[in-house]
Amino acid sequence: MSVAGRETPGTVEEAYAIQDALRPLVDLVGPGPAEPATVAGLDVAYADDDDRLAAAVTVLDARSLAVVDSAVVVARPAFGYVPGLFAFRELPALLDALDRLAVRPDLLICDGHGLAHPRRFGLACHLGVVTGLPTVGVGKTSLVGRWEPPAPRRGAWSALRDDDGEVLGRVLRTRDGVKPVFVSVGHRVSLDNACARVLAATPRYRLPETVRTADRLCRDALRGHLRPGQGR
DNA sequence: GCGACAG
DNA sequence: ATCTTGTCGC
């Protein structure tokens, strides 16, 4: 059976059609939680590039950033890697992982863009529409849009815009003097709040603790745990 | 036609 | 995403 928005397309054309059909369902109004109790991070790791992947979700206490719940699923990529259709690759496994959580997080911080997407429907939007949860997209590199480097201090940002001037997101400095990240709205959050939540989840490193904990979890699940006494 | 192109 | 040593710096 299929839940609305979670079907896997058979062709690129079908994938575009699904995105076009779901895009109007994105909620761009809701400001989102200003003080979420929990924030979740989602990430995926790959092995042999096209054979296997591990999708992980970690739920953190929003204040202490301690992990309070997590789930990881090993599966096969559901779709080839096509820029702009990236979500179809990881979505099924990520949704499986989300279903296995005992705690329902108040906000999802996704590893990939939201509105900063060619058709304004990146992974973060897709996950938001399907789950109904507020979502934020955080990318390490850009997919679309033009921007100027933000000031060197943590918290500084500049607008990410398309050629027509439409704001797609922000280029946000999460750490002094370090390469900024790309933040965009996914679903049910304002851009201001999205950036605030990302900064709140990023006390020390370049990337939010949410993505760091999820990254570790799926990487470990894929490569197998290392036994004590063994290197690396 | 020639690049660019989330993970 | 992943393939990968050493090296600079707090």
Image: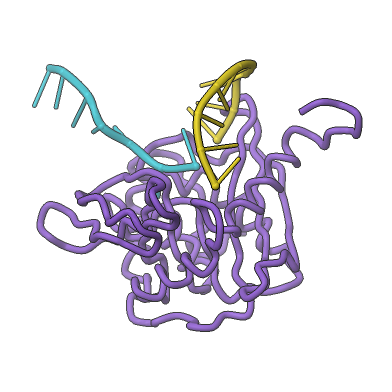
Chain colours: A purple, B cyan, C yellow
Q: Quadrant of the C terminus of chain A?
A: top right
| Vertical arrangement, residue A131 with respect to residue A221, above or below | below
How many badges with numbers are in the image? 0
The percent position of residue A107, horizontal first and vertical second, equals 54, 72
Residue for point 60% across, 59% down: A210
Residue for point 40% across, 75% down: A193
Q: Quadrant of residue A40?
A: bottom right
Residue for point 41% across, 47% down: A178
Q: Is residue A163 left or right of residue B4?
A: left
Q: Quadrant of the N terminus of chain A?
A: bottom right
In terms of depth relative to the viewer, which is nearer, A37 or A92? A37
The percent position of residue A16, horizontal first and vertical second, equals 33, 48
User: Can residue A172 be seen in this snapshot?
Assistant: yes
- Judged from this view, the residue extending furthest toward the left is A164
User: Can residue A7 be seen in this snapshot?
Assistant: no
The percent position of residue A31, horizontal first and vertical second, equals 39, 82
Q: Quadrant of residue A62?
A: bottom right
Residue for point 39% across, 36% down: A82
In terms of depth relative to the viewer, which is nearer, A145 or A207? A207
| Vertical arrangement, residue A103 with respect to residue A34, above or below | above
Q: Is residue A176 left or right of residue A98?
A: left
| Vertical arrangement, residue A190 with respect to residue A141, above or below | below
The percent position of residue A125, horizontal first and vertical second, equals 41, 62
